[in-house]
């Protein structure tokens, strides 16, 4: 079955300072694919995922203090979900130990403020701001909370009242992935060792 191509990496090289992590890499990602990146620690797996999620400006060499630690030293990233072409929220990176609730872009508050709310409160705030996806997510979250309460031990997390910032790492990742997987605007989900805290 033919699947539309989402991203094409052509002769891509990624560098950190003067060190080349990836050199002359060519690969394509298509809709519906599940792709794993395997390699030893420090070989550039996380850097590659961050580059795929980065804005175009972040991929260029930059000496400013707030520039990312990596840059694209050769090649290009093209396709509908490439930097500069994709719509906001269509590519989401779930990092190992730094969950950012930026998948709720219309909530209109800072990351710190979101972390003081429960999952339901954060979704309600975004829905009140006019995001129709958040209304669907609220219904999904309600059904999931009921269905998974006993089967997955969902109730022990205290999702109804526990602020996002007070959830255990495993419970936070489960909630984050539940919302991200349901959100239709997310077309490419980049997972950096997502099972680290899931006791799988």
Image: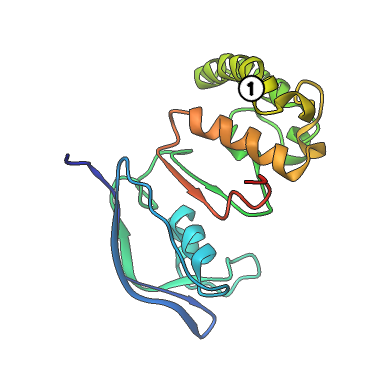
Horizontal side, residue 179 vs residue 34: left or right: right
Residue 52 % position (x, y):
44, 56
Residue 161 % position (x, y):
81, 22
Name above or below for residue 81 compared with residue 76.
above
Colour scheme of the picture: rainbow
Horizontal side, residue 141 vs residue 14: left or right: right
Q: How many marks?
A: 1
Q: What residue is shown at x 38% (from left), y 53% (from top)?
A: 35
Name above or below for residue 72 compared with residue 160.
below
Name above or below for residue 128 compared with residue 171.
above
Q: Which of the 4 image quarters holds residue 108?
A: top right
Residue 149 % position (x, y):
69, 20
Horizontal side, residue 62 vs residue 87: left or right: right
Element at label 1: helix
* Label 1 neighbour load within 10 Å: few <14, some 14-19, many 20+: few
Horizontal side, residue 166 vs residue 104: left or right: right
Q: Which quadrant of the figure contains the N terminus?
A: top left
197 or 135: nearer the viewer = 197
156 or 123: nearer the viewer = 156
Q: Which of the 4 image quarters holds residue 166?
A: top right
167 or 107: nearer the viewer = 167
Q: Is residue 141 visible?
A: yes
Q: What residue is shown at x 57% (from left), y 72% (from top)?
A: 41
Identify the residue position indicated by label 1 in the image. Answer: 148
Name above or below for residue 142 compared with residue 100.
above
39 or 73: nearer the viewer = 39
């Amino acid at each position: 079955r033919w699947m539309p191509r989402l991203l094409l990496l052509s002769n891509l090289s990624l560098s950190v300072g003067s060190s080349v992590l990836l050199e002359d890499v060519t690969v394509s990602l298509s809709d519906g694919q599940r792709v794993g990146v395997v390699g030893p620690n420090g070989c550039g797996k996380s850097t590659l995922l961050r580059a795929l999620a980065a804005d175009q400006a972040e991929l260029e060499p930059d000496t400013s203090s707030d520039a990312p630690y990596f840059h694209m030293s050769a090649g290009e990233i093209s396709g509908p979900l490439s930097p500069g072409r994709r719509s906001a929220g269509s590519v989401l990176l779930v990092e190992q130990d730094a969950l950012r609730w930026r998948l709720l872009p219309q909530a209109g508050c800072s990351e710190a403020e979101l972390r003081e709310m429960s999952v339901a409160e954060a979704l309600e705030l975004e829905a009140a701001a006019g995001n129709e996806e958040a209304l669907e997510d609220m219904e999904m979250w309600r059904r999931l909370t009921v269905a998974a309460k006993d089967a997955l031990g969902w109730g022990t997390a205290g999702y109804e009242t526990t602020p996002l910032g007070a959830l255990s790492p495993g419970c936070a990742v489960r909630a984050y992935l539940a919302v991200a997987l349901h959100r239709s605007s997310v077309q490419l989900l980049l997972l950096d060792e997502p099972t680290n805290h899931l006791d799988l």
